[in-house]
Amino acid sequence: MNLPSLARIAGLCLVATAVAGAVPPALGGEFSVTPISVDLKPGAMSETITVTNHAKDKLRVNIRLMQWTQDAQGKDVYTDSNDLVYFPRQMDVEGEAKRLVRVGLKTPAGTMERTYRLFIEEQPEATPDPARSQIAFYFRFGVPIFVAPAVPKPQPDVPVPTLQGGKLSIPVKNTGNQHFRLVKIAISDAAGYLEEISGWYSLAGTERTYTATLPPDVCRKAGTLDVSLVGEGFRLDRKVNVDPASCS
């Protein structure tokens, strides 16, 4: 697993649509979204998101809310939602201009955090020029929206990692009622070996297992492995005793 890119943190997805033929690509509208995440905390019923068009041409975007959950393997799952108030649902942003999107609560916070993503999706030109043979790239941002519980309590829980067949499995649980974000996992031994795995969000009540395959020579020589989990506002350290029989 690679270190997280800024695009991933911001929830940026890139969609390529072939307009005509295998020809050099043309960049779609250049735009940005701020903030890159929204926290609707107790007492904060609404927030605004700014969409900035950095290009000279007009930008058209659709806006779509989806509930964000994670499955038993910790993978992100998105489903259409109308739980929040947000508008507009579609808008044009003139060249080198800005527009605001407003998002707010319909119902007050409960005992568990509610999580969503507001997807801001660039739309293709309504009447593309047929004489322009190109591949157009259209962008979308998935802005995380967190509706905090009345009494927030994220709770990272990391049982002792296990080693089998040279693969180190590191379970990460969130037994609390609010998300936390794991930035990275560092795996090292006493001989200078170091591997880092990128982390991700752990939503309330979920579990995800991160894995790393150890080089055979490192695994066989290591008596112990140090596993450090670094998150936003926390760090957890675990030590793994290595049985050489678990390396192959």
Image (cartoon, rainbow, N blue to C red):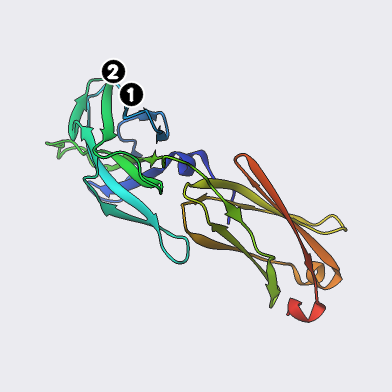
- Amino acid type, callout 2: Ala
Q: Quadrant of the C terminus?
A: bottom right
The residue positioned 75% from the left and 76% from the top of the image is: 247
Residue 61 in sight in this render: no
Instruction: Classify mark 1: helix, strand or loop.
Output: strand
Q: Which residue is mark 1?
A: 52
Q: Residues within 10 Å of mark 1 (few under 14, many from 20)?
A: many
Q: Residue 169: image x %, image y %?
A: 64, 67
Return the mark for residue 97: 2
When asked about the image quadrant of residue 183, the answer is top right
Amino acid beneath label 1: Thr
Q: Residue furthest top?
A: 97
Residue 117, visible in the rendered structure: yes
Please indicate whether residue 41 sits to the left or right of residue 118 in the image. Answer: right
Q: Residue 83 appears at what percent x and percent y?
A: 24, 44
* Element marked by disc 2: loop
> Which residue sits at x=78%, y=82%?
245
Say whether residue 240 is left or right of residue 46: right
Lateral position of residue 64 relative to residue 70, left or right? left
Q: In the displayed structure, does residue 131 sit left or right of residue 160?
A: left
